[in-house]
Image (cartoon, helix red, strand yellow):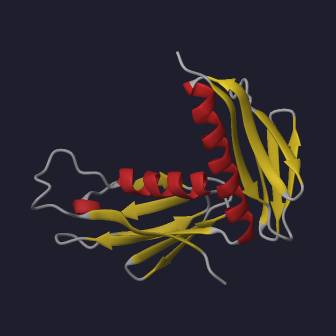
Amino acid sequence: MARDVHVIKTVEIPDGVEVRVEGSRVTVKGPKGELSRDFGHAKGVIMRVEDGKFIAEAFFARSRERALVGTIAAHVRNMILGVTKGFRYKMKIIYSHFPINVKVEGDRVVISNFLGEKAPRIARILPGVKVQVKGQDLILEGVDIEKVAQTAANIERATKISDLDRRKFMDGIYIYAREVVEQ
C-alpha cells in the first residue's frame, strides 16, 4: 500500500474573514455570519492557520487521509465563500394539471393543491436559510451551502411523484440554478 510522505492543501483567507482552529473544530467568521464545523472524524489530518492561510496536511498518508485533506480544504473554502458572499438556489414551480400554491409558514414550506390533493405537502426549512416565493420561483439563500442545498432537496422531495408516468405528469418544484450571491 503506497503512502505519500506529505500531503498538503492550503486555502487563502481573504481580508475581513477570521478562521479559528480549536482541536478538530474549525470556525469561520465573516461579514455575513459565522459558520462552525467539527472535523473530529478526520484522524491523522493536521489543521492550522498560518500567514493568512488555512492549512490541512497529513504525513505518511494512506488514501483515506489523502482524500480527507482535500475534503477538509474544500469544506473550509465553501465556509469562507458562504460568510463573505452567501449561496442562492433557485427553484421553479411547474404544473400542467392543477395550479400549485406555495407559501412559507415559519420554518416550513406548505405546498397545497399539488396534483389536486386535499392535504398539503410540507417541506422543512433548515435554520439559517431564507426562502422567498416570487411568482413561479422559489429563492433560497443562506451562508451554509449544505443547509441551503438540503432545504432545496426537502422541497424537491416533497413534490416527488412515484406512482404516475413522469413523462406525462411533470408537476413539481425543481432546482434550476445554484449560484454564489454577488453584491
Q: Toward which corner of the image does residue 132 lie, by quadrant?
A: bottom right
Residue sitting at x 41%, y 83%? 135
Residue sitting at x 45%, y 61%? 110
Q: Residue furthest top?
A: 1
- Position of 119 with respect to 66 (left or right) is left
In the rendered image, residue 56, in percent from the top left (x then y), is placed at 74, 41
Relative to 42, say whether 70 is above or below. Answer: below
Q: Toward which corner of the image does residue 93 lie, by quadrant?
A: bottom left
Q: In the depicted view, which residue is nearer to us: 19 or 58?
A: 58
In the rendered image, residue 81, in percent from the top left (x then y), is placed at 68, 64
Q: Toward which corner of the image does residue 69 lie, by quadrant?
A: top right
- Position of 105 with respect to 119 (left or right) is right
Relative to 132, say whether 23 is above or below. Answer: above
In the picture, the quarter occupied by the C terminus is bottom right
- Position of 65 with respect to 151 (left or right) is right
- Position of 112 with respect to 53 (left or right) is left
In the rendered image, residue 46, in percent from the top left (x then y), is placed at 79, 33
Residue sitting at x 52%, y 15%? 1
Relative to 90, say whether 126 is above or below. Answer: above
Res. 131 in view: yes
In the rendered image, residue 3, in percent from the top left (x then y), is placed at 60, 22
Res. 113 in view: no
Q: In the depicted view, which residue is nearer to us: 93 or 81?
A: 81
Q: In the depicted view, which residue is nearer to us: 109 or 44?
A: 44
Residue sitting at x 86%, y 33%? 23
Relative to 169, say whether 102 is above or below. Answer: below
- The number of numbered badges drawn on the structure is 0
